[in-house]
Image: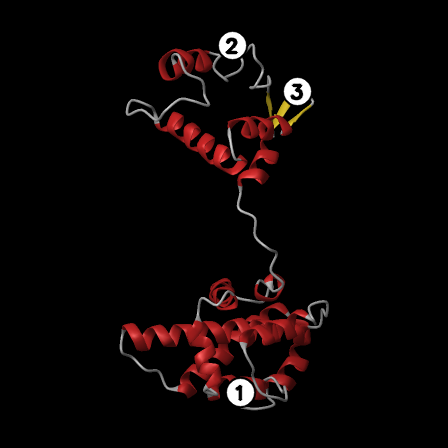
Amino acid sequence: MAISWTKCCDSTIDHGLVQADSVWVHWNTVYNLRAETIWTADHKSHHSESWRAILKVRDILVQLAGGTTDAQALITSCVVGGCFQVNKMYDILRPKYAKVRWDKILWDSTVFPKHGFISSLAAQAKLPTVDCLARRGLPLVNCILHWLNIRGRTVNFWTELEWCRSRKTRKHWNMSLIRCCLAATVYMIWQERNMRIFRDHITDGGIILRQLKYVISAKIFFKYEKYSDEIVDVLSYSS
């Protein structure tokens, strides 16, 4: 997206606004800025919501840049071929976060969205209860591994995520099954934790396990119908 732009720090522009033939610019120059510039104007009670939003963004930009002069330089850096590039300014203003390594694991097409959401919270250490249950050796988790015909025992959640990530390039339905199962298990544990804490209701582990198997099986069979015989062989390994 590009907006026609005249360099706002040009000395010929008194108020820091551009396009002098614009009614909007003329109105804000007379009514809001008066004798000030866009860089020095204070927040007033009579300002409209849109103008307050502009001043708020200005304050964020000045704080981010470390001063008015540097903020003007940042704006100028977003001008390409005489046009202001909104996407460039967006990249400057938005928070920067490190790319996570597990996004494609928890947002696999076979993962239910609500399962993926809760599991993503767990991956960010925002569901510490999951780790506590895992350290106690919750039988439900190991029963699921047995159901999937996977040898071994569960470890911490991040190790499980890393194990799945190291195999993310495998397109076989079995890996989708494991991803679906990982996210669904976290979600079921989180849901049961909430039921116990907030409603004082405890669901039998066997019932939870059956519910878990049902939603996973339904999802996998729906997406990989042509492999139904193979899937039945795996999922029937343990009742």
User: Which residue occupies 59% across, 31% down?
Assistant: 74
Q: Quadrant of residue 83?
A: top right
Q: Quadrant of the N terminus?
A: top right
Q: Which mark is residue 76?
A: none
Kind of residue indicated by mark 3: Gly
Determine the secondary structure under disc 2: loop
Left-right relation of 73 to 172? left
Cα–Cα gap, marks 3 and 1: 62 Å
What residue did someone put label 3 on?
82
Q: Is residue 146 above or below residue 41?
A: below
Residue 77: x and y, percent? 64, 29
Q: Nearer the viewer, residue 180 or 86?
A: 86
Determine the secondary structure under disc 3: loop
User: Which residue occupies 51% across, 10% down?
Assistant: 20
Kind of residue indicated by mark 2: Ala
Cα–Cα gap, marks 2 and 1: 70 Å
Q: Which mark is residue 20?
A: 2
Cα–Cα gap, marks 3 and 2: 16 Å
Determine if residue 136 is in view.
yes
Residue that extends furthest to the bottom in the rendered view of this protein: 238
Kind of residue indicated by mark 1: Asn
User: Which residue occupies 37% across, 76% down?
Assistant: 193
Labels 3 and 2: the sequence-earlier one: 2
Residue 119: x and y, percent? 50, 68
What residue did someone put label 1 on?
142
User: Which residue occupies 50% across, 62% down?
Assistant: 113
Contact, CB < 8 Å: mark 2 with mark 1?
no
Q: Nearer the viewer, residue 40 or 43?
A: 40
